[in-house]
Amino acid sequence: MVKQTIQIFARIKPTKKNTAVYSVSSEEQASASLEFVVPKDTADGFVNNKRECFKFRFQKVFDQATKQERIFEDIAKPVADSVLAGYNGTIFAYGQTGSGKTFTITGGAERFSDRGIIPRTLSYLYECFSLDSSTMYTTHISYLEIYNEMGYDLLDSRQEASRLEDLPKVIIMEDPEQNIHLRNLSLQQSANEEEALNLLFLGDTNRMIAETPMNQASTRSHCIFTVHLCRREPGSDTLRRSKLHLVDLAGSDRVSKTGLNGQLLTEAKYINLSLHYLEQVIIALSERNRFHIPYRNSMLTSVLRDSLGGNCMTTMIATVAVDKTNLDESISTCRFAQRVAIIKNEAVLNEELDPTLLIARLKQEVQSLKEELFMLTGEERDGQLTMEEIQKLEELVKAFLDDPGPDVTLSLGPDMRKIQYCFSLLKTMVLASRIGRSSNCDIQASPAVIPEEKDICEHHSAEEVAKLKEMLMQRNNEISILVKLLKKEKKRANDAILQLTSITNRQKHAIMSDSSLSAMPQLKDGNNEPSSNTPGGRAVLYMKRGPLLSVGKQEAFESFITDHEDHVIIEDNRSLLKQRSAEARKLGEQLHDAKQKINEFKKQIEIHRRQRAVYGVTGNHQNVDEEQDLVEENLRKNIEQEKKTYKNTVGHLKALKTEIEHLQLLLERAKVKLQKDFQKWWSEEASNVQETEARSQTRSPCGTLQPSSPCSPGFEYMPARPGVQATVKPDPTDRACSSSSCQDFRIVIRKTASTH
Ligand code: ADP
Ligand code: MG
């Protein structure tokens, strides 16, 4: 068991303003402090009547320039290591909206180097698995979003989910031992890094699609990405299960400041409520004599129960934005962290016995106990009673029944077999008497009557019945054991098939990374349609297709893209992707060359050996042997050199592949964002146009203009926006209505000289 307080770290978000309200100092090796200096007369909304200086202690404080790599190395890697060892781990980010929680946990959407803790940790875990080939690891992933006290499964791969409410709702269940179970939260197996990243991407995409301008769920919901790890060493009878929760909490902004109302206020209330309950749990845990911890008050605290004051190694990252306007929020974030730092967790190694090996161990234990018993009593208790023992027991029972004294006892010693036999004998007798057997055999009717020689056969039949019953019982046991065995075999066969599939997948993967030479370019150029069989593949496929647009809208969309603020980043990433693809292709060629060279050198060695054999037979050239050795040695050196090159290139190619995949995901995500932004812009503009048109139509003889109006068949609004000039023209072919406003419209889109 490892007792440890929750580790707290602070990360300061980069700011352009030159602000001098804070300072960071690293005092000891394992401690640093973050200090805010607030002048008493500060006019930026923070009323400070008492103190000028607020100092908070953290394990480490990461200042503005800290890179994602360092955050991973210092915070996430130690947690990932303990999860690999079999302990539960949690990392959660806490801070106000916009302070960098999502950036820290998931990463930025622009650059490969902006990858956050989740993708880096996945990369690290799979790298560790491949290095430790003696251990079998299985990984499952779940991704839960909690919004307004309701849980949603983000790994839902159906495509029709366009609102959060369309996603499967997750329900909390509690068993009698008070363990929490999440119903409807899917656990998806991921055999490699790529599959795991696809799941992360699927979850993030579902999160983004479900978000609407009215419901910026991402800042008001809590997201819990969990890696479920199972580790088994061959030959060992135990397995270790551990969980790693990576939590992106909702913004901790206080309601008073947000000044929200209506629906948003309800959301803010819920978020603040759940964060308030989180705080209450933390306060309760930090108080010594508290027995009741109010975990059940909210879904978040129920789910994170183990991470807070339980069996888990937990780490908190306080994200702070240090602009003057955010000072009060930053101070409250740090105060929260100080409370969290008091909580002590007790992480235990989650080791379980494998049931099959447990049975074997129990059998062995039974055997040794039997042997011990034999040593103590001197009696062999194995197997059935002997005929002599049975006879003796029958005599004892007979004597017991014959004796009319009320104090008479039947002493059988500590042998359960004998006790059971006597009981079954007595039962048979009682049953026999009940069905009215002959008075001679009726023990109950005349207990004094002893079965005579002539009745012994009758008595034996009762004995046989008992024996048969016992046999029946044994057969029953055998059958149930056999059924169990059958089930086990079936399960094992299934497991083997699963394993085989995952191995085949892994081999495919290896082949791809090895011979990425041919596969890579396809992948990068986007010609490679992702499989719709995997959840990630389905999501990617959906992203690629996107919603179907009409021709006009498509044209507007294309024009919209070029003016979008993300356009430069997208183009940059696209050209980076091309560049990386070219690099990968080149590396592929190098690999190919190295392989050919190795083969060539091998051939040469073979030829030299043959030559040497020929010289050996003919007895010619004494010096040739030494020369040949030298030649072979040189060739071997060359092979080693080429092997090294090959290995290095494979390493480069692997890293490049990860980067390429990430860039592809970034591009897909950017595309989804573009589509969402476009839809939003489109509907806004359309409603503007509609309003204007409606106003001018009030004078029209045909009344208001509706897209479905008989006066305007197929009308499509083309909103105006910078860079695109949209004109709505009457269709001269329409003669149904003479009024220009009632005619069919053609839409003309012309791109004007854009200032953007
Ligand atoms: P939160 O999740 O806390 O609401 P985000 O992570 O979405 O905040 O961050 C808000 C914005 O600030 C994003 O555009 C993000 O890319 C940027 N950002 C946050 N932290 C950093 C950082 N350390 N370096 C660069 N950009 C950052
Ligand atoms: Mg966020």
Image (spheres, rainbow, N blue to C red):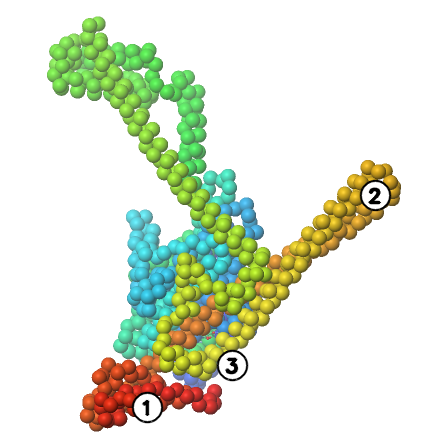
Q: In the image as oriented, which residue stretches furthest toward the top?
A: 453
Label 2 neighbourhood size at 10 Å, few (<14), some (14-19), many (20+)? some
Instruction: Identify the amino acid type marked 2.
Output: Asp
> Residue 128: x, y in percent?
54, 54
User: Dot 2 lies on which element?
Assistant: helix
Residue 73 in the image: above or below residue 569? above
- The part of the image, by quadrant, that contains residue 587 is bottom right
Q: Marks 3 and 1: in contact by CB < 8 Å?
A: no
According to the picture, the residue beneath numbered tag 3 turns out to be 16
Residue on which the image places disc 2: 625
The yes-or-no answer for disc 1 within 8 Å of ligand 1 is: no
Identify the disc placed on residue 729: 1
Left or right of 310 on screen, residue 79:
right
Residue under the image location 42 percent in, 86 percent down: 43
Choose between 53 and 141: the one closer to the eye: 141
- Residue 367 versus residue 5: which sits nearer the camera? 367
Looking at marks 1 and 3 on the same chain, the residue that comes earlier in the sequence is marked by: 3
Label 3 CA crowd tier, 10 Å (few <14, some 14–19, many 20+):
few
- Name above or below for residue 610 compared with residue 223: above
Residue 186, how many percent across, how many down? Answer: 36, 56
Identify which residue is drawn at 30% across, 19% down. Answer: 418
